[in-house]
Amino acid sequence: MSRLLLLFVALVAFPAMAREWFVSPEGDNALGDGSRAQPFRTVGHVLDTSIDLTKAGDTIILRKGVYHECDVRLRKRLSLRAETGESAHIQCDMKVKDSVVVQIDPEASGSRVADLELSGSMYYGIQLQTGWYRGEGQQKTGASNIVLENLRIHDTGRDAIKITPKCDHVTIRNSEIWNTGAADPPGTPLERRNAEGIDNVGGSHMLVEDNHIHDIATTGLYFKGGASDVLIQRNRIENTGMAGILVGFDTSEEFFDLQANPEYYESIRAIVRNNIVRYTGYAGIGLYAARDAQVLNNTITDAGRLGHAAIYFGIPFQDWDANADRPPSVNPVIRNNLIVQDGGTCVEIRWSRELGGLSGLRGAPGTDYNGYQNRRGACRFVDMRVDSPLRAGNLEEWQAHEHSDAHSLSADFKLDAQVRPGPQSPAIAAGIPIEEVKLDFDKRPRSGTNDLGALQSAKP
């Protein structure tokens, strides 16, 4: 075999190695070549489909500085990140119509966005696009197997991160998200705002961990539309206009995959554990049409200041569509949570007479081994269901009528400024060991005991 033929065989068998493309505010799109020595000036130039520089698996590296760009769009599997040890910020002018800072197409599944600051845009900091639609048995997938980590996303027109149907296996970790809804004029009523920290409609197997989500116009994060097997752990969520974490919520009928979820559940088999949720307008952790949800070892303080409760079973109306089922939540497991309120309700189950009567829960609430405190008196428990013998009462009445929380307690839990139980706290060792909760919020071992809440006590 000739050397030329051998070289040809080698090139076919071993495709070219992934390349790194460098971008700098001091670079030049016309004279640069994308190398570290001669970077391009804009990210959009590297992604320009008319010149098609990148191949799947390439990495785009941003040198330090601010990039005034919108709609940075990944159309193939790429990594987009800042140079190691440097700070790079993509800022999109909010006045640009229909703008998003970073978009990821389904064809870019497997991509990673990391170590960047993203701000502005009319709509979202990051949007994961979908090719899914329902009808005639045809389905397509969305941008999946995406990793978003070490990001700072803020001052977005609407949501910080928007996940659309069938964008599955998305990981969001080690990021800070704040000040969503920046496009709303000052004084916009809460009911007219729609600006979550993380908005997931129909994306299954999402992992959200070790993030700080704060000062959010509406809800810190929710996942709905039949999202299954979602894990939310070790997040600090504070100062939200509406809810902290919603397991399910309220989705239009057209976005459900009825082959996988014919009952229209909003969430299936979610686990929410070791999170700290503080200062919410409405529900601390809410369950809406949630099937088999587990809410474990969370600390919720000062929730529901405008309404609802620290733990809230809500009702999805699903746009009042005639075909939708609007099921109640079923089979929840709510254990080892620590709830400290300042006048707000501790647990509430909603019922509504609308559409012939709708309930937030079927069966028992699944609450036990939890700690409840209200700094302004006894904790309030509400069950609005028509067949409930208890519409509102204290913990003892709730235990007697709901057959739940048999091992839960009401006490002053002596939390420090970081909401960790002090050395004399009744929360210490008051929980039950749970196989799914071996570590606490700080990833410290539970050491054979399980304190209530997200944080193990500081042992002497």
Image (cartoon, rainbow, N blue to C red):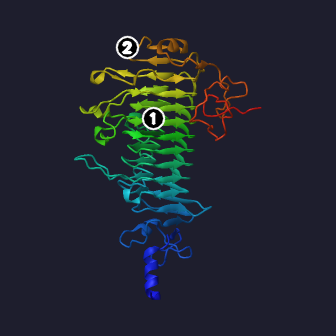
> The residue tagged with tag 2: helix, strand or loop?
loop
Q: Would you identify the image quadrant in which residue 342 lies?
A: top right
Outermost residue on the front side: it is: 1
* Residue 17 coordinates in the image, percent (x, y): 50, 72
* Residue 125 coordinates in the image, percent (x, y): 45, 52
Q: Are marks 2 and 1 in contact (CB under 8 Å)?
A: no
- The number of numbered badges drawn on the structure is 2
Amino acid at circle 1? Leu
* Front residue (pair 232, 320): 232
- At 46% from the left and 83% from the top, the residue drawn is 7
Alpha carbon of mark 2 to alpha carbon of mark 1: how far?
A: 26 Å
Identify the image quadrant of the N terminus.
bottom left
Residue 387 numbered mark, or none: 2
Rendered position, 43 above or below 8: above
Amino acid at circle 2? Asp
Mark nearest the camera among 2 and 1 is 2
> The residue tagged with tag 1: helix, strand or loop?
strand
* Residue 79 coordinates in the image, percent (x, y): 49, 61
- At 43% from the left and 45% from the top, the residue drawn is 159
* Residue 452 coordinates in the image, percent (x, y): 62, 28
* Front residue (pair 414, 444): 444
Outermost residue on the right side: it is: 460
Rendered position, 19 above or below 360: below
Can residue 344 be seen here? The reply is: no
- At 60% from the left and 34% from the top, the residue drawn is 454
Residue 246 numbered mark, or none: 1
Can residue 435 be seen here? The reply is: yes
Identify the image quadrant of the C terminus.
top right
| N-terminal-most mark, 2 or 1 | 1
Q: Would you identify the image quadrant in which residue 250 lies?
A: top left
Outermost residue on the left side: it is: 136
